[in-house]
Image (spheres, rainbow, N blue to C red):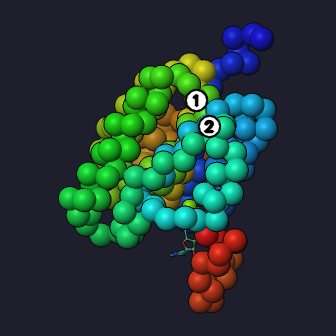
Amino acid sequence: MTKNETRGYIQVYTGNGKGKTTAAIGLAIRAAGAGLKVFIAQFIKMGDYSEIKALKRFSDLITVEQYGLGRFTDGKPLPEDIAAAQKGLKQVKSIMASEEYKVIILEEANVAAKYGLIREQDLLGLIINKPYDVELVITGRHASSRVIETADLVTEMIPIKHYFEKGVPARVGIEK
Ligand code: ATP
Ligand code: MG
């Protein structure tokens, strides 16, 4: 394998349209199919979403940890929300240093940074200190301009139409 083939890049999935989490989960499945180990750190969220239940079937290759209390959406975070996110930040740093995982996904990290659960500087620190081989994937609305500048691949999901606007709530198996 040439050096270029083992290089990992920084991917960002942001914007208000649907598909950010599904893109990251799809990538995790693809990576696992190639025998690569994947670590998914979910900020903000807590709970047995259908994708989490499904990924448990791949627990030899995919590890999921949640660092949210599952109630923060916007506004001002409580100290508990911040503490949970900070724990995530610390664990992701050590996961990265261990070099055990080829793909690291920071779910909703953009949102965590936007609302001050983690500092933007700390998120940028993870990006900058990423080991050469690691593919780092960052999801969530409101990616900061500095995160976008630092990334190698940025996709913005744009909502052309979404049934959410017609009052359709998140459905089990489709959105959660
Ligand atoms: P998916 O998980 O389906 O890939 P996503 O990760 O891109 O979607 P998020 O930004 O994480 O979507 O949004 C989570 C949930 O917020 C959606 O499943 C939906 O129920 C709800 N939602 C969708 N559009 C809006 C909106 N315009 N305003 C507020 N909430 C929305
Ligand atoms: Mg999402």
**Amino acid carrying mark 1 in the image:** Tyr
Regarding ligand 2, which quadrant of the image does it lie in?
bottom right
The residue beneath circle 2 is 38
| In the image: residue 146, left or right of residue 168 | left
- Determine the residue positioned at 50% across, 59% down: 141
Q: State the quadrant of the N terminus.
A: top right
x%, y% of residue 142?
46, 57
Asked if disc 2 is less than 8 Å from ligand 2, the answer is no
Direction left: furthest residue: 79
Q: Nearer the viewer, residue 37 or 130?
A: 37
x%, y% of residue 92?
43, 36
Q: CA distance from mark 1 to mark 2?
A: 5 Å
Task: Decide if residue 135 is in sight here.
Answer: no
Task: Decide if residue 136 is in sight here.
Answer: yes
The residue beneath circle 1 is 101
- Determine the residue positioned at 60% across, 78% down: 170
Report the label total: 2
As drawn, 60 above or below 173: above
Please say if the residues under marks 1 and 2 sit with CB atoms less than 8 Å apart.
yes
| In the image: residue 8, left or right of residue 73 | right
Q: State the quadrant of the C terminus.
A: bottom right
Q: Secondary structure at mark 2?
A: strand
x%, y% of residue 104?
56, 37
